[in-house]
Amino acid sequence: MFRFLLKFLRLAVVAALGTAVAAKLLLDSNAEPTTEEIDLVSIFEGQQLVSEAAPFYGGKVMTMFGGVVLDLRKATPAPTGIYLDLAVVFGGLSLVVPQGWRVKFEGNLMAAGFSDETRTTAEEDVPTVTITGFALFGGVQATTRSPIQAAS
């Protein structure tokens, strides 16, 4: 049974790598600091985006074997809120929001984790970032302090 699990895991990793290579060749990002609805793709690399969009609606973030820092502290939230749809595979996303914003995670985690390190107030009318999608063998972190600043 143990040998079967190892073979299955090896096959899953090889399939994920193959998918990542194909996605790297076929997908392009559409994410600039002033983009109102992003389509951010990070495969085999790390990316940082500091959004200054007014308004910022959200968008899609895909990372495979890489990482993304998405900083929304300079963005103006859309009146309807911000919606992010994630696909995180063997990677991570660090979402940086201003203090007082609410982050709701409604996605699926499979051998992955979600950490909300924001300090949200009890008020109902604060800007809200709703996260959907999935994370597989990776992690999603919501914070009010950029991990790049924390490392300096």
Image: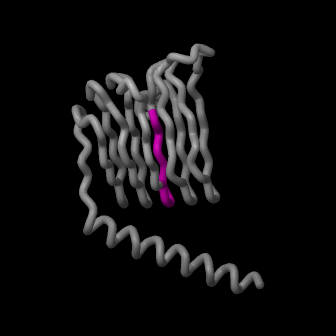
Above or below, comparing residue 46 to residue 121 in the picture = below
What residue appears at the point 57 percent right and 40 percent down from the top-left corner? 105
Q: In the image, which residues are magenta?
A: 88-95
In percent of width and height, residue 55 lies at 29, 26
Count of labels in the image:
0
Is 83 above or below relative to 67? above
On the question of residue 152 being in view, the answer is no
Question: Toward the viewer: 130 or 41?
Answer: 130
Majority SS type along the magenta span: strand
- The N terminus sits in image quarter: bottom right
In this orientation, which residue lies closer to the viewer: 66 or 19?
19
Residue 1 as seen in the image, left or right of residue 71? right
Q: Quadrant of the C terminus?
A: top left
Query: Is residue 36 shown above or below 108?
Result: above
**Residue at the (24%, 34%) spot, across then down:** 33
Residue 146 at what x, y percent from top left?
A: 44, 30
Residue at screen point 31% across, 32% down: 50
Residue 7 within the segment the image draws in magenta: no
Give x and y (percent) for residue 76: 33, 22
- The answer to whether one can see residue 127 in this image is yes
User: Image check: 45 left or right of 121?
Assistant: left
Q: Position of residue 121 (x, y in %)?
A: 59, 15
Report the residue at 58% width, 14% height from top. Answer: 123
Apparent side of residue 103 relative to residue 149 in the rendered image (left or right)? right
Give the color scheme: rainbow, by chain, secondary structure or one colour: one colour
Q: Residue furthest right?
A: 1
Question: In which quarter of the view is residue 74 placed?
Answer: top left
